[in-house]
Amino acid sequence: MRDSFKDLGYAELVTKRVELRKKFLDLRIDMVVHHVDNPLERRNLKRKIARLNTIIHEFALGLRKQREKKE
């Protein structure tokens, strides 16, 4: 199932992208050093990072607006 990034704000998206990039780098290192249980996780992480980059770029272009929080 896909992660839903559409409900997150700009700052949360950037933070999530940093986390996923670190996780991706760690996974790449683990794949070189020793066996990884799920090699398809690398592909899934790349796709999640690409989705985040797309949404962040939409914010930069003004296609997507920051949603106001309802209290």
Image (cartoon, rainbow, N blue to C red):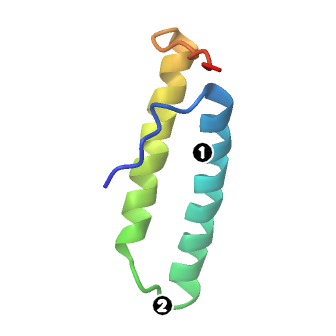
Residue 58's place in the image compared with 23, above or below, is above
Q: Is residue 12 left or right of residue 6?
A: right
In percent of width and height, residue 53 lies at: 50, 35
Q: Which residue is mark 1?
A: 17
Q: Which callout, 2 or 1, points at the residue further toward the start of the chain?
A: 1
Label 2, label 1: how many angstroms apart (C-alpha)? 25 Å
How dense is the environment of label 1, judged by Cα within 10 Å: few (below 14), some, or many (20 and up)? some
Q: Examine the image and state in which quarter residue 27 appears.
A: bottom right
Q: Amino acid at mark 1?
A: Arg
In percent of width and height, residue 14 lies at: 65, 37
In percent of width and height, residue 49 lies at: 49, 46
Q: How many marks?
A: 2
The dot on residue 52 is none
Instruction: Tell me the SS state at disc 2.
Output: loop
Q: Amino acid at mark 2?
A: His
Point 60% across, 15% down: residue: 68
The dot on residue 35 is 2
Residue 6's place in the image compared with 27, above or below, is above
